[in-house]
Every structure is written in structure tokens, then in C-alpha cells.
Image (spheres, grey):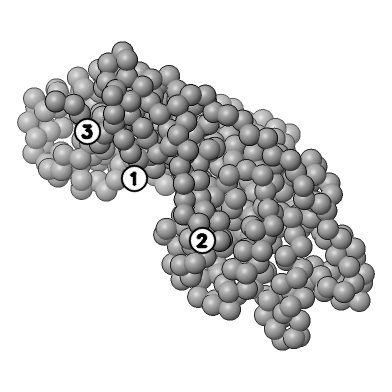
Amino acid sequence: MQKTKEEVWGGCLSVIRDNVTQQSFKTWFEPIQPVRMQEGVLTIQVPSQFFYEWLEEHYVNLLHKTIRRELGPEGRLEYNILMDGHYNGQEPYTVSVPGSPGRSKHQDMSMGVNIGSNIKNPFIIPGLRKIHVDPQLNPRYNFENFVEGDCNRLARNAAQAVASKPGGTSFNPLMIYGPTGLGKSHLVQAMGNQTRTLFPSKTILYVTAEKFTQQFIDALKNHSANDFVNFYQLIDVLILDDVHNLAGKEKTQDVFFHIFNHLHQSGKQLVLTSDKSPKDLKGLEERLISRFKWGLSADLSFPDFETRVAILHMKMYSDGIELPDDVIDFIALNCNTNVRELEGALTSLMAYTTLNKKEPDLDLAKTVMRNFVRNVNPDVSLETIQTMVCEYFALPVDMLRGRTRKREVVQARQISMYLAKKFTKQSLKSIGDSFGGRDHSTVIHSCQAVEDLMDTDRRFRGQLDEIQKKIKISTL
């Protein structure tokens, strides 16, 4: 009996999930939908041309292997690329892509715009005439000092693509979202700065949602709302930071809706940032949210250990300072809230060592950074190991001791048992008891499962190494 399209794609996903990072799986494979299974060919639907090209560039071998595993050596994969409709209400359509992607060329037809004296520019001081718009970009933000990792690779590559062809890619608007302190503003301003370098004739503007709102309020007070709208409709690349701050502001949302429509229809580029994905935004009109979904939404998550170390090295290089490797590891392993906290810890440590004329070492780092680091010197106990593992996987400790069989919980439980056996002198029975009364055979099985995964799964091995480093440093 032939497998259904859902069964074939589900089998592929079960293999893919074990061979890519959780973030990559969420970004690149969860959005895919199987649409047809016929004569040994599985057809999957992907959200955009960019999405398809990324899969072909980075995951083509993995996809081929999984398809052959599910359908045999003659199995093939085809793509349907979902092309979003425009404002005229036309329905989305699909294009079958059986082979290598065609590279369409887009000719850049947009021209730079001068703001004349007949339209009020909200970014100049009253009484002063200014022809060109100040982009409001911080020149310190660029791609060279933005550290790339699994946590931000999609967003960074999309931003670079937009900078190279503003308004000419399939991800317009580009929305970058994620919690505060992960580099959203840095990334979109880096995009703006590179666009400005590549296309000096284009009018580029970076503005926060709060400032946009205040300008609109001022325009209403001064009876110049039309000038406000006309000004923003002349922008070639509009970067609106923290768009979630428009929540509950109905009139501001309405005027932004019309500006958005005009720019998008005119082939201009829109770039947005938010603390949540479009579907999770509250207090915004549905018509705005639907437009945010037209392009590409790319999330930023907290960087892994290696990326955090790279961020610290980048900051140290820019500031002309050096630190011992164990101090860098200590900061990277224990600052796990956001990048600002990571950089703040480094700044505080260097300020203390400079003012007190002391050499930075691990003991000094622990003393100085108590405001940044929790539990800088705990004893290694079963509870400590459980807590560290749960913090790493963002799970409540109670779930390790419960009976749930969810895959992510089972794996965290097995890792905790393995580390408990390695770092404590507790008996197998005591370890099992601390995990909800499990017996010693469960502990033995868990340790074996971890060792087997270490031999076969590179990503898992990296996760385990990071947790072990954190435990070792906590004992120093």
C-alpha cells in the first residue's frame, strides 16, 4: 500500500529533526506542507522563492537522503513555491519547481527622492531647510560587527539580501522579531547602512514606532497630517523599529497602513522589527498583521555558547582588551538572558579591573559579576545538575521528575541522569529516586542512550559539552 503524502513527509521530518538544530528545524522545516504524493514524487509547498533557494543551498543532501529512505532510490522531491498576492486581491498561486532554481533578474528602477520645501520634513529642526533626509542610522552598526550564529543566520542573510536589492526580493516586508537585547536594531540598521552604501541615491529612513507615533500626533496638532503621510510615502527604504509599540493606537495604525500600502505597491522596501512574530502580536489590526505576513518573518533567538564567546571576542577586539579564556567561558556560560547582559557583564568587569588596577582572573570575575550571574559557586548536587539542564532546555525542573514522555523532556532527563552519575558520588538508586522514584535500570538505560547519541549526533554532543562546561566552571 502506497504511503500518503503526510506519512512520507512525516518520516522525512523524523530524520531531519535529529540532524539539524531545533532552531533550524523550526525555521526551515515546520512551515513546509506536503501537497501531493504521486508516482514516487513527493511535492512540498514552501513559502517563498528565497525559502526554496535556501533549502537547496543548505539542506539539499539531507533532503535527498530522507526522500530516498522513504521512497527508495528512485524517489524524487518537487517544490511548489507559494507566491503571495498583492493588494489587488488576487489569489496566491504556485509554481512547480522540479529542478534547480531559476535565478530571476530584477532591474532596480527606483530613484532617489529629494524632499522639497513644499512637504514638511519631520526630521529637521523647524526653521532650517534640509533637502536630503537624514537616515537616522547609527554608523557603528554594520554586518562586520554583527556576529552570525544559528540563532540569527536566517535574519542576517535576509537582511543582507534586502540591502543588495531593496524592494526587489520576495521578502518585502522583512520582519525581524525576537525578545529584547538580541540585536534586532543592530541588524536592521546594518542593513540600512549597507543599502545606503550600495545605493546612495535612495532615501533610507530608520525610525522607532514610538517616534513615528509622536510625529503623527504632532502633525495632527499642527493640521499637517497630509504632509506627514506624503513625507513617508517618498521613502525608498523604511525601517520601523519595535512595531509592536503601535498596539492600541488605532489612528496611528491606520495612517501606517496607508503608508505601508503605498510603499509596497510602489516597489519600495519595508523592514520591521517586533518582540513577537506577526501571528502573536496583540492590539494590532488584522489587516496590518496580514500584510506583515506577506514577506519573510525571521526570528532572533538567544545565541548558543560558541556564538556568545564570539560576541565577547568581537567586543574585546573593538575595545582593544584581552581576557583569559576561562574568564571568557565563565561570562559566556553564565550570562544567558540577552546579548546586552552579556556585553554589560564584560564592560563591568573591565571597568572594575581598570579602576582598581587588578588583573582580571576567574575569582575576580565571580566577585564583580554577582549582579549578572546566578549561583556563581554552587555545590555540584543532583539538584544543581537538574537545574542547569532545565535552564539550558528552558524546561521546568518538575517535568524531569514527572511521568511525561515528551521527547524533549525524556532527553533532558537522560542527560541529567548521565551527568549526575558523572559528577556526583550518588548511587544509581539515589539518582533514580531524585527523578520521581525511578529505578537503577532506568538510570543505566539513560546513560547508555546518552553515550550512543554522543557517538552519532554532532548537535547533541555540542549541547552536552556546553552543559558540562557550565557545571565544571560552577565548581571552580
Q: Verify CB contact (< 8 Å) between mark 3 and mark 1.
A: no
Q: Is residue 88 above or below residue 108?
A: below
Closer-to-camera residue (180/438): 180
- Locate residue 285, reporting x and y percent: 48, 70
Q: Quadrant of residue 454?
A: top left
Disc 1 marks which residue?
394
Q: How many numbered circles does the render carry? A: 3
Q: Residue at x 68, y 35 (%)?
A: 105
**Category of crowding for the residue at label 3, using alpha-carbon neighbours closer than 10 angstroms: few (below 14), some (14–19), many (at least 20):** some
User: If you read the primary sequence from the N terminus, does the residue marked by circle 1 or circle 2 appear first?
Assistant: 2
Residue beneath disc 3: 4
Question: Could you say whether the residue bearing mark 2 is in a helix, strand or loop?
Answer: loop
Q: Residues within 10 Å of mark 1 (few under 14, many from 20)?
A: few
The N terminus appears in which quarter of the rendering? top left
- Which residue occupies 74% across, 40% down? 107
Q: Earlier in the sequence, mark 3 or mark 1?
A: 3
Q: Is residue 19 visible?
A: no
Q: Residue at x 29, y 23 (%)?
A: 40
Secondary structure at badge 1 equals loop
Q: Looking at the picture, which amino acid does disc 1 mark?
A: Ala
Label 3 or label 2, whichever comes before in sequence order: 3
Position in image of residue 317 (x %, y %): 70, 32
**Which residue type carries mark 2?**
Gly
- Left or right of residue 399, residue 88 in this image: right
Mark linked to residue 89:
2
- The label nearer to you, 1 versus 2, is 2
Tell which tag, 3 or 1, sits nearer the viewer: 3
Kindly check if marks 3 and 2 are in contact, taking CB atoms under 8 A apart as contact. Answer: no
